[in-house]
Amino acid sequence: MAQAGQTTQATFPPPAPTQSAVAGRSARAVAIAVLTRYPMVLALVVLLIVTTILDSTFWTSANLQNLLSQNVGLMLCACGMTFVIIAGGFDLSVGSVYAAGAMFYISFLGQLPAPLAVILSLLLGLGMGAVNGIIINVMRVNPFVATIRSRVTRISAFAPISTPRVGSSASSTG
């Protein structure tokens, strides 16, 4: 029990069981200890089991390749955000940078060679990240405020490009 003026602090997640503590426990007890420490692993396993039962083609190579190719952009963003979070920061503008790069690329399709459009889109994303970095590190603006501001600014800036106009072929129903 803590004395007056002292506080106790709980650790989360709880510490992993030591090797000697695991040696005397049954496999079931170890599994329960691991699953209570990492509940998202249990959720993933349940999700994979249910998906396998509902769709017999889930584990085919064609389906797995399709899932990976559809989610490569999300995976790349997640890898980059992992480094940001490990460094102790956060960036709320990642989705808008990704969307702005995609809109920028699409706007150049047919006008420029695809590799050049990809390079220009990557440079746009690099520039947006550099602006956020300057605002946060040089101007000393709180990262939450700076990245949410840049997210809103990008959404506003690219809305005219991404919104179909009345009477255009993109908005017609056929």
Image: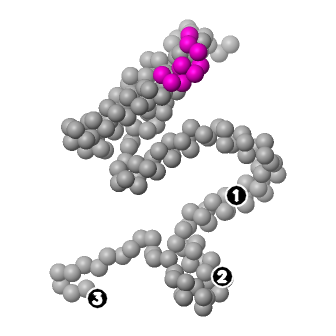
Tell me which label, 3 or 2, sits earlier in the chain.
3
Mark 1 nearby-residue class (10 Å; few <14, some 14–19, many ≥20):
some
- Circle 1: element type: helix
State the CA–CA distance, disc 3 to disc 1: 43 Å
Could you tell me the amino acid type at mark 2?
Arg
Q: Label 2: which residue?
A: 28
- Which numbered marker is on residue 1? 3
Q: Residue at x 43, y 30 (%)?
A: 125
Q: Position of residue 124 (x, y in %)?
A: 43, 26
Tell me which label, 3 or 1, sits earlier in the chain.
3
Q: Is residue 44 visible?
A: yes
User: Which segment did they paint magenta?
Assistant: 111-120
Mark 3 nearby-residue class (10 Å; few <14, some 14–19, many ≥20):
few
Q: Is residue 147 above or below residue 32?
A: above
Comparing labels 3 and 2, the label whose residue is closer to the camera: 2
Q: Quadrant of residue 127 in the image?
A: top left
Q: Label 1: which residue?
A: 48
Outermost residue, left direction? 5
Could you tell me the amino acid type at mark 3?
Met
Q: Quadrant of residue 118 in the image?
A: top right
Q: Is residue 169 above or below residue 163?
A: above
